[in-house]
Image (cartoon, rainbow, N blue to C red):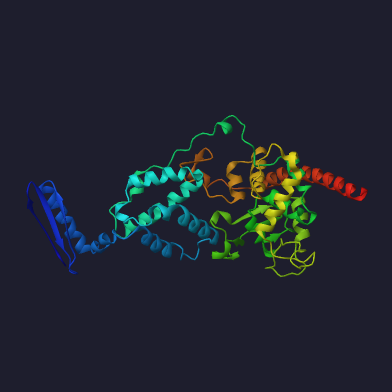
Amino acid sequence: MGSVSWRKRGSRYLVSWRLDDGSQGGKTVDTPHEARDLAAEKRLEMRRGTWGGRRRGRLPFGRWADDWWAVWAADPDRSPTTLAATENRLRRHVRPWFSDQPIERIGPTDIRRWQVQLAGKVGRESLLACRSILHRILQFAEDEGAIPTNPIRKVPPPKQRADPEQVLGEVKRRAYTPEEAGRLLGRIPLAWWDHVLTLLGTGLRFGELAGLRRRRVHLDRPLPVLQVVDVRYQAGRQFGSGFKPRPKSDAGIRELPLGPLLVESIRRQLPPDSDPDALVFTGPGGGNGVPVGTRTMLSRYNFHRVYQNAIARAGDDLGELDPHGPHDLRHTFSTWLEDAGIPARVIDEVMGHERSRHAQVDGGSRVGARYRHTTPEMAIRVIAAIDERLTVVLRVAEAIAQTAQSARRAF
């Protein structure tokens, strides 16, 4: 099993050890009490079999990152988009800084330096995501016995500083008013109107819209609903594209109430056959040799291009806004519900957000939240709030579309 001994060496004390494989080492301490404690610790490690883990602490961070990734990425429930984002951050922002350092030599000072330089390159959300990756790799090494403690615990994350422009109300919005949404919709080709109206009226993520199956749509119920389950993902060349049988979190599995305008939009998009697994929302065709009107699989990149082209055409009509992409429509849905006085708990449910982990939820306890449910009356309030705003959206969009059509006829 190996041996451990200690002896006085000058004014200090040397603890020495030798393992069964012939490797040996030593450490000098100041007092006989420290020497006894260290020798006892080493003997205990030998008995528990963690001594090999301590020697593995000399391996470079990059080797530990490889081992962690092999285990973490093998989880079959891991989202391909999450895998792609994590791999990108690990490759660009974590590995280059720590790659060749023995993992046992990485201390709080190294992590603080890394964190400071990273803060100058990326936003706070990306920085926290990178911290999470580093934390998991170091925790993996600690669990394997390679390091005694995870040093990142001693380094607090950077504080979020208040944005003066946001405090003073000068930051541009991502959420549209109904009139602004109508100006945007009026610049979007008619083939995409139902898609945009459904995103505005349900708060679906684009992948949830693109993965919606016919069997998840119930338009003939007394209270029409669509069910969010299947999700389309596009995670780049390395992780590919396809469909997941469930959202990223359990909270994403939900039913969304539909008003008359949304029922009309979705009914127009239903596939002509009765296949329950057929996709509801598809592309309009007309590109890459595909005839116009052919139902093609929705592409996040194509829809993003359609959205950005409409933003460009709208120009100064959206002067108070700071559009980022189609996810703005999800921001808009949430904002409209909040403006209508819908409780935050209900907004979280229809948005598919996880419940808060903090002690308080919407001013009440976490236990209390279990006793509050979304009633049909509340669903009707949601429908009324959205339908009222979508009516304005359509009125504005139709006026813009008619003006554009008249202008074309004049030429």
Please, is residue 12 above or below residue 72 in the view?
above
Q: Is residue 317 left or right of residue 339?
A: right
| Residue 36 can be seen in this image | yes
Q: Is residue 258 left or right of residue 167?
A: right
Looking at the picture, tell me which residue is in the foreground, 32 or 312: 312
Looking at the picture, tell me which residue is in the foreground, 410 or 226: 410
Q: Is residue 366 left or right of residue 373?
A: left
In the displayed image of the protein, which residue is found farthest to the top?
A: 168
Locate residue 377, reporting x and y percent: 67, 45
Residue at 75% in and 44% down: 314
Residue at 6% in and 48% down: 10
Locate residue 261, reporting x and y percent: 77, 50
Looking at the picture, tell me which residue is in the foreground, 389 or 295: 295
Locate residue 171, reporting x and y percent: 61, 35
In the displayed image of the protein, which residue is found farthest to the right?
A: 410
Residue at 65% in and 46% down: 328
Locate residue 103, reporting x and y percent: 32, 56
